[in-house]
Image (cartoon, helix red, strand yellow):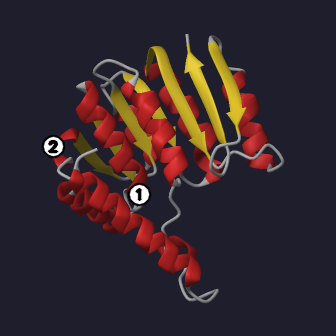
Amino acid sequence: MTPDITEVLDLYHARREAERAAPAGQLALDDRLLAVGPETGRLINILAKSIEAPVILEIGTSYGYSGIWLAEAARAAGGRLITMEISAEKSAYAREMSAKAGLAEYVDFRVGDAVEMIGAMAERIDFVLLDLWKDLYIPCLEAFVPKLNPGAIVVADNVRPERELMAQYIDAVRAVPGMASVTLPVGSGLEVSRYR
């Protein structure tokens, strides 16, 4: 990690701590930094770097925290990150932060409906981070599976099997022919899958 990247990650960590210390109800849910934590960030960075010249797809840019980890992996492995977000404001913030980190040239920011944008993609995919509203996990999965390269890795965040929508996602990803999958107690729960 370069000093620019570390500095940007520190800014995100400070924001996250400030939001946690704020009185309940002060910030709307959609205004909060609902990002993967540092532990998950490190894991997705390591996994994405394990693929040579990966096309990385992040579904749910939000404010760009996980995108920093993924863009650094893209830079290191000779690949690129495509990140999708429905909010133009959040995408613009993430773009600004990636520029501060010196990673903007490795990131393609796309704004709009994720399922539609995935369907329109010409690229084949080597790594996916799925981290958006939970009712969209299965529609996104169905859209990107036909575009996965052999050996592709799919990481879904906030996976807690006791939550009905997440249990449905786990069942759906494990039913994909050729997909091996495991739930990991990292961060707020991850389902890590590999497409053979």
Task: Determine whether label 1 and label 2 are within 8 Å by CB.
Answer: no
Towards the viewer: 169 or 35 = 35
In the image, farthest residue toward the right: 162
Q: In the rendered image, is residue 191 in sight?
A: yes
Residue 2 point in image, percent of width and height: 23, 47
Quadrant housing residue 122: top left
Q: Is residue 188 above or below residue 8?
A: above
Numbered badge on residue 6? none
Question: Residue 17: where, in percent of width, then height?
Answer: 51, 74
- Amino acid type at circle 1 is Ile
Q: Residues within 10 Å of mark 2 (few under 14, many from 20)?
A: few
Q: Secondary structure at mark 2?
A: helix
For the N terminus, which image quadrant? Answer: top left
Left or right of residue 168: residue 133 = left
According to the image, label 1 marks what residue? 86
Q: Quadrant of residue 107?
A: top left
Q: Which mark is residue 105?
A: 2
Q: Position of residue 55 (x, y in %)?
A: 33, 27
Q: Give the residue at x 69% y 45%.
A: 159
